[in-house]
Amino acid sequence: MTQKDLDNWFQYHAPTPGQVERYNIIREAAKQFAEIVVENTPSCPDQTVAVRKIREAVMSANLTVACNED
């Protein structure tokens, strides 16, 4: 991990028009998966964790787009 990495990870990355479209695709796919999880599992703490991890996956995917393109 370098200072360059930290600077990149902790700065604001304004989305480009192409990135906005991909963020929307990622979010929509994750929402569909979360709906499937909720519809097919009992409401319990584990279900909450599963949906939370889907949300975390969206954030990680968005970071990949934001922080790794020149």
Image: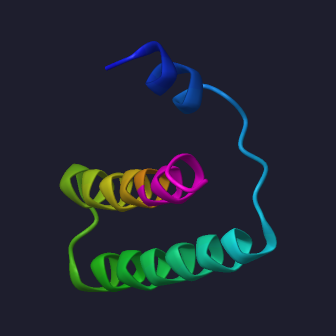
Question: Residue, x 50% and y 22% (percent of image)?
Answer: 4
Q: Looking at the magenta stretch, what is its main secondary structure?
A: helix
Q: Is residue 11 left or right of residue 65?
A: right
Q: Is residue 29 left or right of residue 42?
A: right
Within the magenta stretch, is there residue 69? yes
Q: Quadrant of residue 28?
A: bottom right
Viewer-nearest residue: 15 or 47:
15
Count of number-bearing discs = 0
Q: Is residue 44 above or below residue 5?
A: below
Q: Is residue 12 above or below residue 64?
A: above
Which residue in the rendered view is the most extreme toward the front?
A: 70
Question: Residue, x 61% and y 70% (percent of image)?
Answer: 23
Q: Quadrant of residue 38?
A: bottom left
Question: Residue, x 57% and y 82% (percent of image)?
Answer: 25
Viewer-nearest residue: 58 or 49:
58
**Horizontal and vertical percent for residue 34?**
39, 75
Question: Residue, x 56% and y 31% (percent of image)?
Answer: 8
Q: Is residue 17 left or right of residue 27?
A: right
**Horizontal and vertical percent for residue 70?**
61, 53
Within the magenta stretch, is there residue 24? no
Q: Is residue 64 above or below residue 41?
A: above
Work out which quarter of the rendered image holds the N terminus and state it. top left
**Horizontal and vertical percent for residue 62?**
53, 57
Residues in magenta?
61-70
Instruction: Tell me which colouring the rendered structure shows.
Output: rainbow
